[in-house]
């Protein structure tokens, strides 16, 4: 029939097709077959790592966390303040003479930024003299960076802005034993600086003798003025008051090595203001102690100890073996913030990771049982978690702290530091696992009714296989995220409680980021901002990085994204 000679769907006849269209193929039949895949499907863990690597924010966060962890581990090992004499510093390095020393970085030497210097504004001429006439080896006054003239009524005066080296603490009096004194004498002789302007030991002061002479001078002045009929406020009450005020000032500052005299205006002597007594050339007059031959006295031995007056910066370096320069500065006690921040970060991270791990394990087991079996078991377990969650952690912390401290055997076993950590651990493990349990329960309810789980159950799979092979891997992304985000939560809780003074690890010899923030609060942001600045930076980086890192892990372990690695 006519239709049979046509190609289906066309109007062309077979007879109309050219024979050249039907040529024999030269393809070898042996090549005409299916080929096996040359690649194998990647494992779930490898795929998770590939997906995580695609999240740039999470990678940066992981690097920041790793850097902080390395900082917390390495700094205590390499910092010279870690290896100070444990007898002299039983609770760790501290030196109040370098209280609130500013951050110092040798890379910025002389720049005015991060070089241990500060600008003190509105200083008087007396302040200028105090910083200028210093007999130490390290001059505190670097330069006068500004001055301003003030007019108050008919009087005029100037104020000065001074650039001060916070590490040039001047000369201090110390008491050392025979062995230490001989070491210092030998050291100065070896360096060739003994009894020179560069020596560590400076002449002792004899301000008691000077004040006796000055008191007699005031009495003579009063008598002379009275003979001339000139009125003055010098009397048997004001003269001892002037001497007592000067004596107090000399006692408070061992940097004052020159004569001070009461301020005088119209023959009226001030009882609480003084000026530097100068010679005819305008130079200060010293009050150094001298022996019968007029030689300067550098040490005096009393009750087996030598009293010496030293340039404290150089003496510190001689005594401890390292220069007193601190990258992040010091706090009110003169403790190295750089070292304390590393110790605090290490303690806070260990506390956060440890508590989070315990909470994760407890919450995972509890939530898995509750979510998998459901029914009466779920109902009872949920009511238990409701009761536990109604009691605030701070109440548990307070009760534990009191009970543990009153337990003599426990206190002797773990010490006061251990009791503080144990109380915090119990308080935050008591109810910290409830969030993980709730998340795990929800995930089990979500996945236990899926077809693949029911199919596996039909084939005779045990409950343990269903839980660990089919349900948990699918819930891993959410659970890992919640556990990672628990770490900054614990750190932030500890920091908040320490900052508010509810817990105090400092009293037990421990250091955390929260205790550093508490130190910064006491120091004041305006007066000593560096004490608060660096702990704030670290805890902010930890909070942000852990959140970004947790989000990256959530996406990486999300089983619905499996196969999206390319």
Image: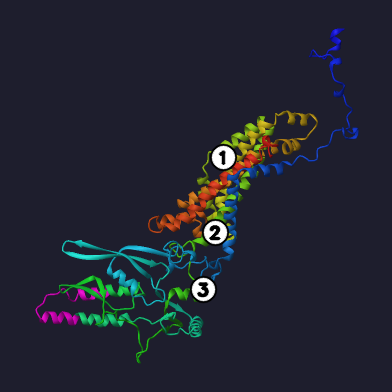
Residue sitting at 46 percent across and 75 percent down? 314
What is the C-alpha distance between the residues marked 3 and 2? Answer: 21 Å
Query: What number is the disc on residue 342?
Result: 2
Lower position in the chain sequence, tag 2 or tag 1: 2
- Element at label 2: helix
Q: Is the magenta stretch mostly helix, strand or loop?
A: helix
SS for tag 3? helix
Q: Find the residue positioned furthest to the left.
A: 229
Residue 120 is at least partly visible in this image: yes
Q: Mark 3 and mark 1: span between their CA atoms? A: 52 Å
**What crowding class fits label 2: few (fewer than 14 Cα within 10 Å), some (14-19), or many (20 or more)?**
many
Side of 132 relative to 302 (left or right) = left
Label 3 packing within 10 angstroms: few (<14), some (14-19), many (20+) = some
List the residue tagged with mark 3: 320
Relative height, residue 456 to residue 184 (above, below) = above
Look at 49% across and 63% down and name the residue there: 327
Looking at the image, residue 344 lies above or below residue 93: above
Q: Counting residues from the N terminus, which is met first, the one under dot 3 or under dot 2?
A: 3
Q: Residue 388 carries which label?
A: 1
């Amino acid at each position: 029939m006519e239709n049979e000679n046509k190609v289906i769907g066309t109007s062309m006849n077979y007879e109309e097709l050219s024979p050249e269209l039907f040529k024999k193929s030269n393809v070898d039949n042996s090549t005409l077959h299916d080929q096996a895949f040359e690649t194998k499907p990647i494992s779930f863990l490898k795929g998770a790592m590939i997906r995580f690597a695609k999240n740039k924010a999470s990678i940066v966060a992981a690097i920041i966390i790793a850097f902080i962890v390395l900082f917390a581990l390495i700094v205590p090992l390499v910092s010279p303040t870690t290896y100070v004499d444990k007898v002299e510093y039983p609770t760790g390095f501290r030196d109040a003479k370098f209280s609130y020393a500013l951050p110092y970085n040798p890379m910025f030497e002389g720049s005015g930024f991060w070089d241990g210097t500060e600008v003190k504004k509105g200083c008087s001429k007396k302040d200028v003299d105090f910083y200028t006439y210093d007999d130490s080896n390290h001059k505190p006054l670097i330069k006068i960076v500004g001055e301003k003239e003030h007019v108050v009524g008919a009087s005029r005066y100037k104020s000065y802005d001074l650039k001060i080296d916070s590490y040039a603490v001047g000369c201090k009096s110390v008491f050392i034993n025979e062995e230490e004194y001989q070491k210092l004498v030998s050291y100065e002789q070896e360096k060739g600086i003994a009894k020179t302007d560069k020596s560590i030991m400076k002449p002792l002061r004899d301000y008691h003798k000077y004040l006796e002479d000055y008191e007699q001078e005031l009495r003579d002045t009063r008598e002379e003025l009275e003979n001339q009929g000139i009125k003055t406020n010098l009397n048997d009450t004001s003269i001892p008051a002037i001497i007592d005020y000067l004596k107090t000032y000399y006692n408070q500052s061992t940097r004052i090595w020159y004569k001070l005299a009461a301020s005088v205006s119209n023959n009226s002597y001030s009882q609480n203001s003084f000026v530097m007594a100068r010679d005819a050339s305008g130079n200060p007059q010293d009050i150094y102690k001298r022996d019968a031959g007029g030689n300067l006295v550098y040490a005096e031995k009393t009750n087996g100890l030598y009293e010496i007056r030293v340039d404290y910066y150089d003496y510190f370096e001689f005594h401890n073996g390292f220069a007193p320069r601190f990258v992040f500065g010091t706090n009110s006690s003169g403790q190295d913030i750089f070292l304390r921040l590393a110790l605090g970060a290490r303690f806070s991270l260990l506390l956060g990771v440890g508590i989070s791990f315990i909470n994760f394990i407890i919450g995972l087991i509890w939530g898995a049982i509750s979510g998998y079996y459901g029914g009466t078991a779920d109902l009872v377990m949920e009511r238990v978690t409701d009761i536990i969650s109604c009691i605030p952690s701070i109440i548990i912390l307070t009760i534990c702290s009191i009970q543990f401290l009153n337990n003599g055997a426990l206190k002797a076993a773990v010490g006061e530091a251990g009791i503080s950590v144990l109380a915090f651990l119990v308080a935050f493990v008591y109810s910290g696992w409830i969030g993980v349990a709730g998340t795990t329960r929800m995930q089990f309810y979500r996945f236990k009714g899926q077809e693949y789980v029911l199919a596996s159950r039909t084939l005779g799979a045990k409950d343990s296989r269903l839980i660990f092979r089919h349900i948990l891997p699918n819930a891993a992304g959410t659970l890992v995220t919640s556990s990672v985000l628990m770490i900054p939560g614990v750190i932030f809780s500890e920091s908040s409680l320490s900052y508010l003074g509810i817990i105090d690890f400092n009293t037990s010899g421990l250091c955390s980021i929260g205790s550093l923030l508490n130190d910064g609060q006491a120091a004041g942001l305006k007066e000593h901002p560096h004490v608060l600045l660096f702990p704030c930076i670290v805890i902010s980086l930890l909070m942000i990085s852990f959140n970004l890192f947790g989000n990256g892990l959530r996406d990486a372990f999300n089983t619905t994204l499996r196969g999206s690695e390319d």
